Image (cartoon, helix red, strand yellow):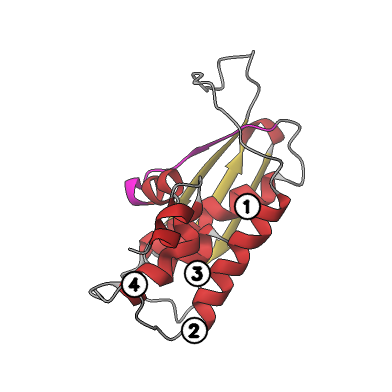
């Protein structure tokens, strides 16, 4: 890993910006060797630059137990799930739910993609009506939890993490 990659990696959430770069440099040992830059790398690094430019500085986080029962820390709650036939999203406090069928040509062995897409959809949908800055998403898929918790995914799933 180059020193630039190490510098970018320490910034919160930047693993998503280097996903394709990590794949392209895996197994390379020449310190200043050249690699071909592709569209995915450009997209990820552009996403990163936009987020850094829009950043309002460094934030230190205070650990707090976030749950719907903790009224001091109001949060929007959503439940998501995906199956072999569709995606479901439910915002109980908003009295609203969403569902959609999977595309007919969708591979049947990639439920993880649709679980992650459901969580991404909740993040985007919650911006339309949430009155809080906190969002609790319940999912039954530990891989989905892991990619959003670490902001690190394999290249086919990285576009979900850096969606706008």
- Circles 4 and 1, Cβ within 8 Å, touching? The answer is no
- The residue to which callout 2 is attached is 38
Indicate the secondary structure of the residue bearing disc 1: strand
- Circles 3 and 2, Cβ within 8 Å, touching? The answer is no
Q: Which mark is residue 102?
A: 3
- The residue to which callout 4 is attached is 23
Mark earlier in primary sequence (1, 2)? 2
- Circles 4 and 2, Cβ within 8 Å, touching? The answer is no
Mark earlier in primary sequence (4, 1)? 4
Q: From the top left corner, tell me how far across and down residue 88 is, in percent.
A: 53, 52
Mark earlier in primary sequence (3, 4)? 4
Query: Distance from label 1 to label 2 (Cα)?
Result: 35 Å
Disc 3 vs disc 2: which is toward the camera? 2
Indicate the secondary structure of the residue bearing disc 2: loop
Query: Distance from label 3 to label 4 (Cα)?
Result: 29 Å
Quadrant the C terminus occupies: bottom right
Among the 4 quarters of the image, the one containing residue 91:
top right
Query: Distance from label 4 to label 1 (Cα)?
Result: 35 Å
Disc 4 vs disc 1: which is toward the camera? 4
- Circles 1 and 2, Cβ within 8 Å, touching? The answer is no
Residue 29 is left or right of residue 164, and the answer is left
Indicate the secondary structure of the residue bearing disc 4: helix
Mark earlier in primary sequence (3, 2)? 2
- The residue to which callout 1 is attached is 98
Disc 3 vs disc 4: which is toward the camera? 4
Q: Is residue 109 visible?
A: yes
Q: From the top left corner, tell me how far across and down residue 24 is, in percent.
A: 35, 77
């Amino acid at each position: 890993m180059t020193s630039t990659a190490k510098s970018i990696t320490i910034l919160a959430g930047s693993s998503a910006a280097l996903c394709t770069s990590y794949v392209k440099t895996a197994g390379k040992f020449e310190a200043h060797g050249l690699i071909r830059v592709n569209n995915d790398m450009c997209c990820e690094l552009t996403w990163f630059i936009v987020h850094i430019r829009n950043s309002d500085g460094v934030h230190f986080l205070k650990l707090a137990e976030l749950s719907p029962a903790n009224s001091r820390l109001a949060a929007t709650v959503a439940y998501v799930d995906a199956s072999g036939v569709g995606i479901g999203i439910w915002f109980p406090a908003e009295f609203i739910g969403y569902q959609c069928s999977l595309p007919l040509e969708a591979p049947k062995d990639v439920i993880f993609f649709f679980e992650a897409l459901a969580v991404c959809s909740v993040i985007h949908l919650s911006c339309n009506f949430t009155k809080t800055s906190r969002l609790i998403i319940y999912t039954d898929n530990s891989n989905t939890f892991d990619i959003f918790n670490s902001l690190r995914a394999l290249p086919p799933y990285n576009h979900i993490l850096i969606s706008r």
